[in-house]
Amino acid sequence: MSDDLLEDDDDGLIESKSARKRQMHALQNLGEQLVELSAAQLAKLNIDNEALIEAVQLAQRISHRSGRRRQMQFIGKLMRSADAEQIADALDALHETSRKAKAQERVIEGARDALLARGDEALPEVLAIWPHGDHQLIGQLTRSAHEERQRDQAPTSSRKLLRYLRSLSEASAED
């Protein structure tokens, strides 16, 4: 019944206690997403609140369940004073960048697999994706990789082909 009580907010708007609790849980969930990030990803977010960053780094080191829970609640409290929308937008941008990188890696691996499976027949398709690629080098690496497979050798040429396709992809992304 106490959840139904309404209280005045700073803006003069009336907000229920349950609505405030939902908002605080959302902030705590946002804090949990911060804790799951690596140190490099956390640094990319450009969070201005030093206390929040330190609390997140401490939570990453805590392994005990109840201690981690208390730290997450503290992070939720700190999130109230932080710019949650900016942090959420930065997290979304970080996740979008990660999704794009994974999609690009799938394209690269698919091109390599097509070259290894079909040989020179797949070369025009790969050159359509990366027109500035060296067709002689790609063909040579493909044939070498195919020979290594037949001889049950280490896939050295296959790795070189993958590295070369990655470099082509990075060069086309910079253009």
Image (cartoon, rainbow, N blue to C red):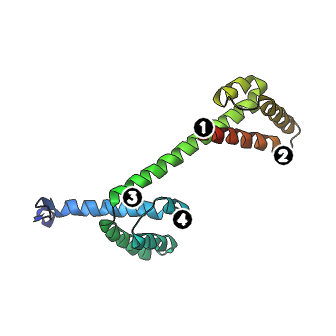
Q: Mark 3 against mark 1, which lies toward the viewer?
A: 1
- What is the three-letter code of the residue carrying label 3? Ile
Foreground pick, 162 / 26: 162
- What is the three-letter code of the residue carrying label 1? Asp
Q: Left or right of 152: which side holds 37? A: left
Q: Mark 4 and mark 2 in contact? Answer it, CB < 8 Å.
A: no
- What is the three-letter code of the residue carrying label 4? Ala
Q: Is residue 32 above or below residue 107?
A: below
Q: Left or right of 121: which side holds 54? A: left
Q: x%, y% of residue 3?
A: 16, 64
**Residue under pointer 1:** 175
Residue 122 shows in the view: no
Rendered image: mark on residue 39: 4
Marks 4/2: CA–CA distance: 35 Å
Quadrant assignment, res 106: top right
Marks 2/1: CA–CA distance: 34 Å
Marks 3/1: CA–CA distance: 30 Å
Q: Left or right of 32: which side holds 111? A: right
Q: Mark 4 and mark 3 in contact? Answer it, CB < 8 Å.
A: no
Q: x%, y% of residue 171?
A: 65, 40
**Residue under pointer 2:** 154
Number of numbered discs overlaid on the protein picture: 4
